[in-house]
Amino acid sequence: MLLGQTYWSVSVRLSVEVPVPRRVPRPAPRRASRTRAALAALLGAALTAPLALAAGPAHAGDRYTVTPLKFTVRAGGRSCAVDADLYRPAGVDRTHPAPAVLATNGFGGSKSDGSTDAIGKAFAERGYVSLIYSGLGFGHTGCLISLDDPGIDGRAASRLVDFLGGRRAADDGTRADFVALDAPGDPRVGMIGGSYGGAVQLATAANDHRVDALVPLITWNDLAYSLDPNNAVGAREVPGAFKWQWSNGFYLMGEGQPLTTPSLDPSRINSLTCLHFVTDACDTVHTLNSGSYPADRTARLLGYARSVSPTTYLSRVKAPTLLVQGQADTLFNLNEATAGYRTLKAQGTPTALIWQSWGHSGGITDPAPGELDLAQGNLETSYVGRRILAWFDRYLRKHRHTDTGPAFAYYRDWVGDPHHTYATADRVPAPDRTLYLSGDGRLVDNRAEVTRGSRGYTNWLVPTSHSESSLAGTIGLPDPAPYDTEGTFLAWTGAPLTGDLDVVGAPRVTLRVVSPKAERTQDSGDAADRLVLFAKLYDVAPDGAQTLVHRLVAPVRVPDVTRRFTVTLPGIVHRYPAGHRLRFVIAASDDAYFGNRGIKPVTVVSAPGDTEVLRLPVVGG
């Protein structure tokens, strides 16, 4: 049921979110390629280097000192030790205090992996006190893995804010009396980090309004959407298509920790059936893997996933938040950050949104020129880095006239000059260009050109379409190009473009399908009997080669096969060059997801006055 290769695929991708800075020299890795060097870092400190347990502070030249600390906290009904490192810049003391930065690791990492200690070093070198810690259940921190639960992980992080505010000492008696305060016990503190280290910021700020600024990178808004996505608009209570590769990778990484971190302390053990996660997390994965979703189990599954997701508690987040999401990300796509941004903006929380190039599915270890890359120490010289520094300058250093930048910015990979790759706007573009799905397989821009016609496909009992393998690309293995097997998909292809077409945002398509078998089973009481399909957009070159932009697909479990439904595709930033063609596809399956239960033939009927519609968010004319 749980494939061994999936553990490696996700452990490679999620342990690190930002590469290591090279300001402090390190031994060169024994190496065949940068990708394989990144593999070691991504597997976490337990596989790459022993954890530093020195009794006294370490010195990085005359720039800062690093002191290992332990904090005993109460989390999820357990007492456990949090393992942390305190970075103190030179010259910072009680009479010369500095604001603080708090950060933790991505899933499967620790305070000592390249992604996390990079943050401590980078901000200590820029005059910030940095407290970097291993998240609950990882590295040498105790307690169970609770998926950034605001009532567990958020409250544990709040105890570290107590330390920075002078309200408590570390277990060895160390106190931080050199952090700038807004009031007694209220430190001036911001948080930054990626993926698992991103959501915990929102979970902390929801509980603790002493946190002054957040910079979550490539993280989730709704874990139900992330791991079991249903892109049908308004179908929040209908489970989607299980993203089994990513989800089982998380699960096996967490449960397999005795292999990577021997001698786990008792606070990290749950039970024989659920070793290291909280029980609700294990039950959710087991339900998803079962392939059966009766109403009561579905309600519990969706309820738990959302309870540990910002979507349910963003109303309590008041700290100014700079959301940074990656375009190359099949795990947490651009729609996640967009939803969070719109919620925060609507409630008056100061917020901004950046769509950078790299994410979980590419570019983390080798960012494009000019992109944020802490391995190169380029905070000041990258667009995203400058925005982060300005955000903290404004809200932590309290330089009230600092310009924090536009509401929305996005990276354009077709711009060659690394100094001008970002475009900006006052809002995320909405779909504004309409195309019609003709009965003869054409994609046309005039309803009058729609031809009456009927076409269909049939799913097999095994997957017949491929979008990505979460293992291959990360460890340097070839990942087959996306494909669809003849007879198991429908495609609509546009005419060659007469000029460049820039799509920025989330396309939407309104569909109506005919599937008598799906219609007969959709009211069975088990959501798994409903029709599943996968929508996607290709870029077709003049030679016929097609590209699935960032390998993104939109899984849909159709809420009611007897009615029209609207699908929101993952957001993209993509230029379709002149001479290329757009191709819209609906497919019966995808091997990265669970699909249909049973054979469910599908037919799509089009006519000039009654046809399916694709809407694109187009910028620049």
Image: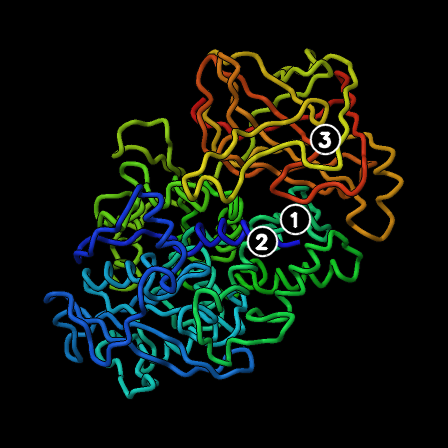
Do labels 2 and 1 touch, CB within 8 Å?
yes
Q: Earlier in the sequence, mark 3 or mark 1?
A: 1
The quadrant where residue 283 appears: bottom right
Q: What is the x, y in percent for residue 357? A: 39, 39
Q: Residue furthest right?
A: 520
**In the rendered structure, which amino acid carries the disc numbered 3?**
Leu
Camera-near label (3 vs 1) is: 1
**In the rendered structure, which amino acid carries the disc numbered 2?**
Ser
Residue at x-position 33% and y-position 81%: 185
Q: What is the x, y in percent for residue 27? A: 20, 55
Residue at x-position 52% and y-position 47%: 331
Residue linked to disc 2: 247
**Res. 327 in view:** no
Above or below, 51 relative to 286: below
Residue linked to disc 3: 511
Viewport quadrant of the C terminus: top left
The alpha-carbon separation of the residues under discs 3 and 1 comes to 22 Å
Q: Is residue 462 left or right of residue 538?
A: right
Q: Earlier in the sequence, mark 2 or mark 1?
A: 1
**Label 1 crowding class (10 Å Cα cut-off): few <14, some 14-19, many 20+?**
many
Q: What is the x, y in percent for residue 286? A: 68, 60
